[in-house]
Amino acid sequence: MSFQFDHRQLADEMEIFFLNEEIGAGLPVWLPNGVAIRESLEGFMKKLENKAGYQRVVSPHLAKGSLYDRSGHLRAFGDNMYPPIKGSEEGEHYYLKPMNCPHHHKVFSSSLRSYRQLPLRIAEYGQVYRFENSGSLKGLSRVRGLSQNDAHIYVNPKDSKQEILSVLELHEYCYRVLGLKGYRYRLSKSDKNRPNDFDGPQELWCESEEILRQCLTEKGLDFFEADGEAAFYGPKIDVQMKLNHGHEESIASIQIDFNSGEKFDLSFISSSGESQRPWVIHRAPLGSHERFVSLLLEYYDGALPGWLCPVQLYILPVNEEHLSFAEDIASKLSDNGIRVFVDHNLGSLSKRILFAHRLRPLFKMVLGKNEISSGDVSMQGRDGDRIVNLRHVSDFLLKRIAIPE
Ligand SMILES: [Zn+2]
């Protein structure tokens, strides 16, 4: 854990994203190096979720106001939504979606559901838009357009504890692989003094808060409780981490929702043949790409783990005559799934080696006549140098960019 630098400075040097006034405040454009990180994270999550029984959907970026009326977002979250857009000839209004939940509820109700299909886990890397105050916008960590590692799990209420335990396990696994430490969990409850801010009967709040408490306790996780931090539709477990400014912030959450079943008229046929309401679990272990990549950049001071590194090998040909040899090697390595950058600036080598640092590559390799004639190259890594024969460079790198188990 480092947090020495602001992610905006790191992202600038590493060419991760940019913001442009003409495009709009808080609407980052991801550059190829940033996309490499996003896609690695996304590929990792999709594989995990696939194994855990999630099914993927893709939903549109906007929907009718009536959908958000029904979900309660217009009432509880309206200030954070973009103003309505005229979306039909009849003058009906549409909104950019601030959350994926209502769309996923519609996926659930799009066909008749039986208890045998539950838990039904619907996942999407969903793009959402939030009208954040311009003063609070900050690089990638506070934006107006973001892509969430989202999923909604429709569960028989009696099985919700078991499912929350699995979701917690998934969180712990992700953070272990990503090497994240120094976070703790927060049980975010309603505030009994502000009942209007929290939908649904008191007994259900108590019951579901107790389920979350039991899950955290059984898993032996470090947690504390906080009143008034719940979502308006149910209590949640937040993952809290101290970021570079020293403040503790939520990086992800797991929410129990016993309200949306009623609001969206969701039902499944129980084992006794009766119609029953499911509960919904909202979860996003990696939050949004925007927020999570900003966190990872600061956490690692840009020196990301090998599998997430945008540049896994940075090749520096000594001069022009070594360039095509370097391009050949790069092309073979990239066929094997390794991300390689070849430096075409053929000035002073020592200056170029120093400059290479801005991209925080996993390894650097200088390629000149000695290396080409002997076949042995020096792989300059973060923990020192290793001599590797060119025939083995691919295997050497593949081992170092594998996702840890
Ligand atoms: Zn949700």
Image (cartoon, helix red, strand yellow):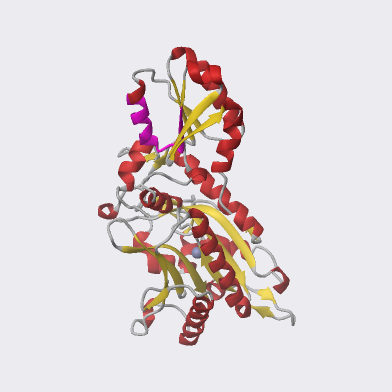
Residue at 36% x, 50% y: name it: 298
**Residue 56 makes an appearance in the image:** no
Percent across and percent down for residue 356 are: 38, 31
Q: Position of residue 354 (x, y in %)?
A: 34, 30
In the rendered image of this protein, does residue 194 appear above or below residue 12?
below
Query: Which region shows up in magenta?
Result: 351-365
The C terminus sits in image quarter: bottom right
Observer able to see residue 205: yes
Residue 353 percent location from the top left of the image: 37, 28
Please say if 321 is above or below 20: above
Depth check: 179 or 57 in front? Answer: 179
Foreground residue among 213 and 373? 373
The outermost residue toward the top is: 321
Residue at the extreme bottom? 203
How many numbered marks, from 0 up?
Answer: 0
Task: Specify the farthest residue to the left.
Answer: 135
- Tell me, yes or no, whether the highlighted magenta stretch contains residue 362: yes
Q: Position of residue 217 (x, y in %)?
A: 50, 78
Q: Residue at x 61, y 34 (%)?
A: 336
Residue at the spot 56% in from the left edge and 66% down from the top edge: 169
- 281 magenta-colored: no
Q: Does residue 204 appear to the left or right of 158 in the view shown? A: left
Image quarter hosting the N terminus = bottom left
Q: Nearer the viewer, residue 70 or 289?
A: 289
**Magenta portion: prevailing SS class:** helix
Nearest to the observer: residue 82 or residue 123: 123
Q: Residue at x 53, y 45 (%)?
A: 40
User: Taking 259 as reference, is 3 above or below it?
Assistant: above
